[in-house]
Amino acid sequence: MSISSIETFVVDLSTVADPDPLPVRTYEATVTEISINLSKSSGRPTIKMLYYISPDQYPVDFDVDNAPDGVTMPSYAGANCGTPPEAKQPTRLGLARYRQLFERHGLPIPQLALDPREDLGGAWAPTQDSLSVFIGARVLVTVVHEPYEGRMQAKIGVVAPID
């Protein structure tokens, strides 16, 4: 069964320009999602966070039509923060990176239980539940530009707590 459309939208894609990337500067943002996976390059647990920047944070000269509902940007804020699967116990560097992750988000530093996680190949890492304290955290993110496939792309550079 198909539903017929009352209206058809036709566009010549050759005339559609790329949207401008979010300008380089510091924005207030909210952590909306956090996940932990194994890095393909290092084999260590890596924490990926999604940060939402609302349109009221845009500079006055930024065209809101580029992203009228705000922008959600990923950051591998906890890149290689864990211990590789072959390690017998968590490393001091891995533990320090977890502590820094809490500090950058202005969160109290907890006692963090680490387990050898089967879903991460046996790597020592916190549970997904223990990382849920990041959801909703308000932080300052510095957006930078980097080339990607021949175009400039906005990317999270630095994350810092809001004083």
Image: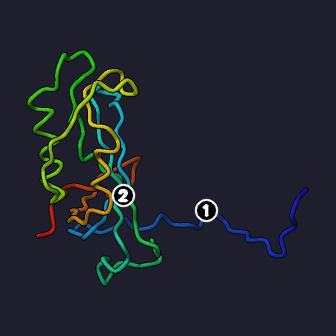
Q: Amino acid at mark 2?
A: Met
What residue is shown with label 1?
A: 14
Q: Nearer the viewer, residue 83 or 144?
A: 83
Taking the spot 36% from the left edge, 21% from the top edge, the residue there is: 121
Which of the 4 image quadrants contains residue 151? bottom left
* Secondary structure of residue under mark 1: helix
Taking the spot 80% from the left edge, 75% from the top edge, the residue there is: 7
Q: Residues within 10 Å of mark 1 (few under 14, many from 20)?
A: few
Q: Nearer the viewer, residue 1 or 58?
A: 1
From this viewpoint, which residue is outermost toward the right? 1
Left or right placement of residue 19 versus residue 43 in this view? right
What residue is shown with label 2?
A: 73
> In what quadrant of the picture does the C terminus appear?
bottom left
Taking the spot 59% from the left edge, 67% from the top edge, the residue there is: 15
Q: Is residue 87 above or below residue 26?
A: above
Task: Please state the horizontal and vertical placement of residue 29, each as a whole percent of the image.
Answer: 28, 67
